[in-house]
């Protein structure tokens, strides 16, 4: 078993489970992760997801033991599987939180960057090590890093291949918080539980609007123009208004 799924109420916890390889993902795992996230997206009982790794590490990227000696057709197949995996995480219409402990490097960092929020332990470390094997970063890392820290800092991180500790990652806005008082997995589950109490349809639409921030301002407003009138017709909107008037917590049902 290289992938573990657990449930804590409305929160699904996905654990990369290859601790002997710092949770490096194999070719088979690319498909398994993509399929699992696709299924979780369709599961109405799941309202938030935590992605983490076993054995004190998040993910050391793709398993280098499977690299090399591949023809172009085989390598294109690998890239399609990689992109299907990363798209399944990024397109999840529910909040996804990465709980990062230890190594989070290469395409493993891309997995975390595809999540909505990243929490880290004090010993978390982040690096783009592709240059060591004559590769450029993949799985969307350059696109994600550029959005988060700007092109110049992203270039420095990629070109140097240096390791960023949790403190620097927090300073640069690459993680949301450092969890020093308790296991980062527990902190991520607690946060996911709080987010799972929100209105599912509105959260899904908000995620779509965040992705649309690469559009021009006018194009973004056109997208927003389509979203809010749709949300105004939902049962969750009516429940939110009623709960506000009654001064009680809302009970959102995702409709």
Image (cartoon, rainbow, N blue to C red):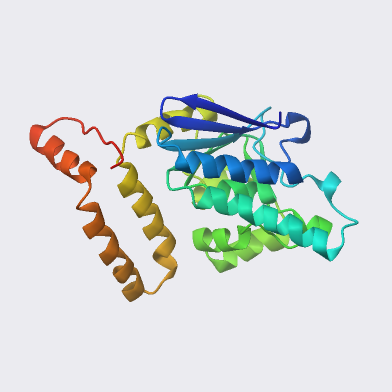
The vertical placement of 90 against 180, above or below, is below
Q: Which residue is at 66% across, 29% downward?
A: 54
The vertical placement of 39 against 207, above or below, is above
Q: Which residue is at 74% across, 43% downward?
A: 28
Residue 31 visible in the snapshot: yes
Q: Quadrant of the N terminus?
A: top right
Residue 114 visible in the snapshot: no
Q: Is residue 244 left or right of residue 104?
A: left
The residue closer to the viewer here, 251 or 165, is 251
Q: Position of residue 180 (x, y in %)?
A: 52, 29
Q: Quadrant of the C terminus?
A: top left
Q: Is residue 178 left or right of residue 142?
A: left
Q: Which residue is at 44% across, 68% downward?
A: 214
Q: Position of residue 242 (x, y in %)?
A: 12, 38
The vertical placement of 176 against 207, above or below, is above
Residue 11 placement: quadrant: top left
Q: Position of residue 12 (x, y in %)?
A: 49, 32
Residue 31 placement: quadrant: top right
């Amino acid at each position: 078993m290289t992938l573990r799924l657990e449930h804590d109420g409305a929160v699904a916890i996905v654990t990369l489970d290859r601790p002997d390889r710092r949770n490096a993902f194999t070719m088979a795992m690319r498909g398994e992760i993509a399929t699992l996230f696709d299924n979780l997206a369709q599961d109405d009982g799941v309202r938030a997801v935590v992605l983490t790794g076993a054995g004190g590490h998040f993910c050391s990227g793709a398993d280098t033991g499977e690299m090399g000696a591949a023809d172009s057709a085989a390598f294109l197949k690998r890239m399609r599987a990689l992109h299907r995996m990363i798209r399944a995480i990024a397109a999840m219409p529910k909040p996804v939180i990465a709980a990062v402990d230890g190594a989070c490097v290469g395409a493993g960092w891309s997995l975390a960057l595809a999540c909505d929020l990243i929490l880290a332990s004090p010993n978390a470390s982040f690096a783009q090590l592709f240059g060591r094997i004559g590769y450029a970063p993949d799985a969307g890392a350059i696109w994600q890093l550029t959005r988060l820290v700007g092109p110049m800092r992203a270039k420095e991180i990629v070109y140097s291949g240096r390791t960023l500790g949790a403190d620097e990652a927090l300073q640069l806005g690459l993680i949301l918080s450092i969890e020093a008082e308790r296991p980062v997995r527990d902190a991520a589950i607690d946060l996911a539980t709080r987010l799972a109490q929100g209105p599912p349809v509105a959260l899904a639409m908000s995620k779509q609007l965040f992705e649309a921030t690469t559009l021009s301002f006018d194009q973004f407003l056109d997208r927003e123009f389509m979203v809010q009138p749709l949300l105004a017709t939902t049962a969750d909107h009516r429940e939110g208004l009623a709960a506000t008037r009654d001064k009680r917590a809302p009970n959102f049902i995702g409709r």
